[in-house]
């Protein structure tokens, strides 16, 4: 792991990050990999900007095989519900705004590809998987709308629902004839992560 200190924050680059970027470049061509990487950076920049706006310091920014992870100094639930919703939702919002701008003002084919990369990253992170932004938003809503014990049970049910729906999606996609390596690698990642988080 490579670690760089920037004041109180540390940038961490794990080997799996470099391996994933290399695999993406080999499988899809460097142009799409670069657009996807930029879309991920913009996504995390959305989270970081709102965190800094609220004065919440960042302990680490970890680049790993599955993307980029922000590690905070304080517990997530020390923020108010509204602030936490803004922090969690801001990454997807940035990606969707960039996609909308590229769709409204199409300048070139390259800009369109960049817009679609942002759409893909934003929509992927909005999935209701417990470790993605969409799942984190659902869990925040569970704790806001229900008693603590009920919210805990709903959070566990969400994890199990993820573990069931991902293999079902893989089977359905295979049956309908989708033969895309990247899609199946992503589904394997989602299945593995649903058990690990």
Image (cartoon, rainbow, N blue to C red):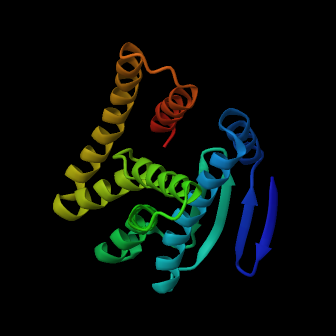
Residue closer to the observer: 26 or 169: 26
Does residue 57 lie above or below 66 as drawn? below
Residue 138 position by quadrant: bottom left
Residue closer to the observer: 81 or 50: 50
**Place of residue 14 in the rendered image (x, y in percent of width and height, measured from the top left):** 75, 50
Does residue 109 lie above or below 107 as drawn? above
**Place of residue 48 in the rendered image (x, y in percent of width and height, measured from the top left):** 54, 73
Q: Could you tell me which residue is drawn at 29 percent across and 75 percent down? A: 82
Q: Could you tell me which residue is drawn at 71 percent across and 45 percent down? A: 30
Residue closer to the observer: 195 or 32: 32
Does 98 sit left or right of 64 as displayed? Answer: left
Does 55 sit left or right of 14 as displayed? Answer: left
The furthest residue to the left:
146
**Place of residue 95 in the rendered image (x, y in percent of width and height, measured from the top left):** 46, 62
Residue 104 position by quadrant: bottom left
Does 194 sit left or right of 58 as displayed? Answer: left
**Place of residue 99 in the rendered image (x, y in percent of width and height, measured from the top left):** 43, 61
Does residue 184 lie above or below 79 as drawn? above
Q: Could you tell me which residue is drawn at 72 percent across and 41 percent down? A: 25
């Amino acid at each position: 792991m490579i670690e760089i200190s920037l004041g109180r924050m540390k940038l961490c680059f794990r080997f799996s990050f470099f391996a994933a970027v290399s695999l993406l470049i080999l499988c899809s061509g460097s142009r799409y990999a670069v657009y996807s990487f930029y879309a991920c950076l913009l996504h995390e920049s959305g989270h970081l900007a709102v965190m800094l706006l609220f004065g919440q310091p960042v302990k680490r920014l970890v680049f790993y095989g599955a993307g980029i992870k922000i590690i905070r100094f304080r517990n997530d639930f020390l923020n108010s519900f509204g602030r936490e919703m803004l922090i969690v939702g801001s990454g997807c919002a940035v990606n969707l705004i960039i996609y909308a701008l590229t769709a409204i003002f199409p300048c070139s084919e390259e800009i369109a590809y960049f817009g679609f990369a942002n759409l893909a990253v934003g929509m992927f992170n909005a999935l209701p998987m417990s470790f993605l932004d969409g799942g984190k938003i659902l869990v925040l809503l569970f704790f806001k709308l229900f008693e603590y014990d009920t919210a805990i049970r709903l959070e566990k049910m969400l994890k199990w629902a993820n573990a069931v729906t991902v293999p079902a999606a893989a089977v359905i996609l295979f049956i309908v004839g989708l033969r895309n390596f990247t899609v199946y690698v992503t589904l394997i990642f989602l299945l593995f992560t649903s058990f690990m988080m």
